[in-house]
Amino acid sequence: MELAPAGTPGRSGSADGTGAEGAPAVLPAPAVLPPPGRPRPAGGALWALGAGWLASRTLLLLMVTGVLRLGGDITADVSVIYHGWYGVLQTGTFPLDDVTWQYPPGAALVIMLPGLLPWSYLVSFWVICGVVDALSMGLLMRAGVRAGRSYSGAWVWVAGVPLLGPMIYNRYDLLVTALAVAGLLALLRRPAIGGLLLGLGGIIKVWPLLALIGTPSGRRTRRSWTSAAATAGSLGFLLAAGMNGAFEFLKFQKDRGIEVESLGAMPLHIARMAGTWDGQVKMNYGSTEMLGPWVDVISKVMVAGTLAGFAWLLFWRLTAKRRTAATTYDAALAALLVFTVTSRVISPQYMVWLVGVAAVCLSVRATSQRPVAVLVLLATPLTMLEFPLLFGQVTASHTWGVVVLGLRNLLLLAAAVLSCVRLWRSSRAPAALAPTVVLPAPPEPAANPAYPVRPGIAYEQDLLDGIDRPHAGAER
């Protein structure tokens, strides 16, 4: 499933551009695109994006700092929980006795980072989030400048992050999402660097490794997967060797219930409203979970759904017949949606993962995930509405809380199904041949060119450019 470069001779023509009988060859018409690598004119688009980001983040910071009050105080996760972990990690051990520590060992690096800055832990955390947010925006704007790309991805980032409310600057998931965005954008042209960034994100919060499911087969897959495995493995080994209890969090996973905001919690909410479920809702392993009858059965169904989803993704990878410049990104979004909707936990901050990967997808014009990104964006304000504004009603299974949560979860479920369907269809049929024109035979090359170029290098460069120009040539 490699892409054929533009102008690659087919069966009716030889390498010198002539037909089998010496007649002029029939070649695909060249796509009308700017030369590869040359940025297209930006006009006022970049200024509009910059202004939009600055205005939306100003409003977001007013909410984060409490100037504009939106619900209750949600800074406790940083100022109390994260700061408390920071104190424990400074002693050279992970929080072994704290069941709220549910993260891979690389999360310790993020928790320790605010301590390097001169301000209070909370303010330093906000500063880091703001810088990471701006860097992600810059990467998406830069990606949109290139030929065959779009600024739509940057607009998704402009709108999607503030729609999640002040919570997003009070969780470390924004930092992990930034690593995933950078890794995905680097994956095609610099697979080793992309794999390194995704591996670093994986040792912090696992899910960025899902982005590797759609890498093009061959050299890019080998380099990116090897780099990701080496980064995650070596960093995990160093943290485990240097600190106590790096992987103790794993033993808590089997005892978890169903988090109140997850898709699996919806039947329990409905049963509770009808008075037919007599379980309880309480803090359990760092999140508000539903415990009691049917929880164990639902947990097993959710795990089975995760396994079935990733089995399908593996089948898709092995049977896909064509790829475009967007296929790697589209597969990453599909995998992340499958992981999210089948998880026993859907915390509000998980939505920024989807916003980030959807933004990367829409940075390529050929993406199949445009309607999926719309569904994700529609789900973000509902997430802010259910947390923190209606979270009390959600935990009590009151009508409005359950209705808002149900709408959000239905949107995510619809996005997951639609994403998989569109990914499947986009990779089934071979690419249509471009219109053809008859070109005269090119002149014979000079016998002794002054600057000879190895054909292999030119072919590899054209292949690389073809990934960003999916219609530049016909696939084989």
Image: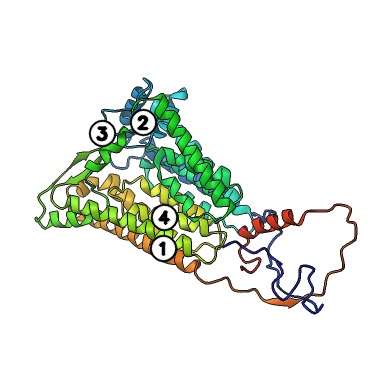
Q: Of tags 3 and 2, which is closer to the observer?
A: 2
Query: Pointer 1: what residue?
Result: 420
Q: Secondary structure at mark 3?
A: loop
Q: CA distance from mark 4 to mark 3?
A: 28 Å
Q: Nearer the viewer, mark 2 or mark 4?
A: 2
At label 4, the amino acid type is: Ala
Task: Kindly state the secondary structure of the residue where label 2 is placed.
Answer: loop
Distance in Å between CA atoms under marks 2 and 4:
27 Å
The reply to whether the C-beta atoms of the residues labelled 2 and 1 are less than 8 Å apart is: no
In this rendering, the answer to whether 473 lies above or below 287 is below
Q: Position of residue 376 (x, y in %)?
A: 40, 56
> Residue 456 has which mark?
none
Residue at 54% x, 51% y is 221
Q: Residues within 10 Å of mark 3 (few under 14, many from 20)?
A: some
- Circle 4 is placed at which residue position? 335
Give the Cα distance between marks 3 and 2: 13 Å
Q: CA distance from mark 3 to mark 1?
A: 35 Å
Mark 1, residues whose alpha carbon is within 10 Å: few (<14), some, or many (≥20)?
Answer: many
Residue occupying the point 22% across, 49% down: 394
Q: Disc 2 residue type?
A: Ala
Judging depth in this view, the residue of 226 and 173 nearest the camera is 226
State the colouring used for the structure image. rainbow
Badge 4 element: helix
Q: Earlier in the sequence, mark 2 or mark 4?
A: 2
Q: Which mark is residue 99?
A: 3
The residues bearing labels 2 and 1 have C-alpha atoms spaced at a distance of: 35 Å
Kindly identify the amino acid type of the residue bearing the numbered disc 1: Cys
Residue 455 placement (x, y as % from top left):
76, 57
Density class for disc 2 (Cα within 10 Å; few <14, some 14-19, many ≥20) is many
Instruction: Tell which circle, 3 or 1, labels the residue nearer the N-terminal end.
Output: 3
